[in-house]
Amino acid sequence: MYIYISLMSIEPLFNFEVKIENKKLLYIIESRGIEFTELRMIHFIKELDIFLETLRNEKIKKVYFIFNMTKYTIPKNLTLLRELSDVFAKYTHIFIEKLEFSIIEVDNNIFRMFLSLFKQYYTPRKPLYICKNQEETQDCLNDPKKREILHEVNSTDL
């Protein structure tokens, strides 16, 4: 006997949004602050893969990622961390070509612990900035001078 579970009935961990702001194409992934379960994480990995697949569109020349983790909760089970990093690794060549930089918006240090674990499996190929709030995120996106004073994460950080 097979059990069929519709991915549409699983409450998502993250919201995905694409928008243009100040002539910049933004790919936004926002934590919803709900409890991580293995099923929700599998669903997120599949949705993330579909979301990133859209970067293959030839019309997209330059993109910026914003990861809003202000509502992030630490998963109790990190067994799918490798699968998550594999999705990002799958698009490395596209990131190198099209991604200008990424921003992680987070107002606490808990996410930094998760990021340090994640970076054991995947190293960002473009600049990655940590911003504390929406105002810093906007400064990072739109003001190169202010971006210089923000914390850029590199492979030796965390």
Image (spheres, rainbow, N blue to C red):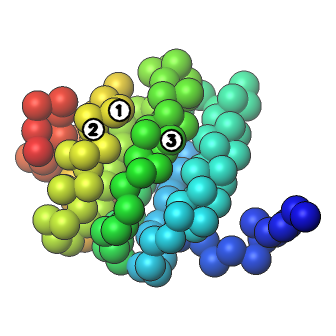
Tell me the residue that label 2 is attached to: 119
| In the foreground, 45 or 63 | 45
Mark sitting earlier along the chain (3/2): 3
Q: Which residue is mark 1?
A: 122
Secondary structure found at label 1: loop
The quarter of the rendered structure image containing the N terminus is bottom right
Q: Nearer the viewer, residue 37 or 32?
A: 37
Which numbered disc covers residue 147? none
**Residue located 42% across and 51% down the image:** 79
Amino acid carrying mark 3 in the image: Glu
Q: Are marks 1 and 2 in contact (CB under 8 Å)?
A: yes
Q: Position of residue 86 (x, y in %)?
A: 50, 34
Up/down of 94 relative to 112, above or below: above
Q: Is residue 87 left or right of residue 8?
A: left
Q: Residue at x 19, y 66 (%)?
A: 110
Q: Is residue 15 visible?
A: no
Badge nearest the viewer, 3 or 2 = 3
Image depth: mark 1 or mark 3 in front: 3
**The one of 144 and 58 positioned closer to us in this rendering:** 58
**For mark 3, what is the residue?**
83
Using a 10 Å C-alpha cutoff, classify the residue at mark 1 as few (fewer than 14 neighbours), some (14 to 19) or many (20 or more): many
Q: Which class describes the residues within 10 Å of circle 3: few (<14), some (14-19), or many (20+)?
A: some
Q: Can see residue 111?
A: yes
In the image as oriented, which residue stretches furthest toward the front? 1
Point out residue 90 in the picture as x, y percentages from the top left corner: 56, 27
Image height of 106 relative to 82, above or below = below
Name the amino acid type tagged 1: Tyr
- The disc labelled 2 sits on which kind of residue? Lys
Mark 1 → mark 2, Cα distance in angstroms? 5 Å
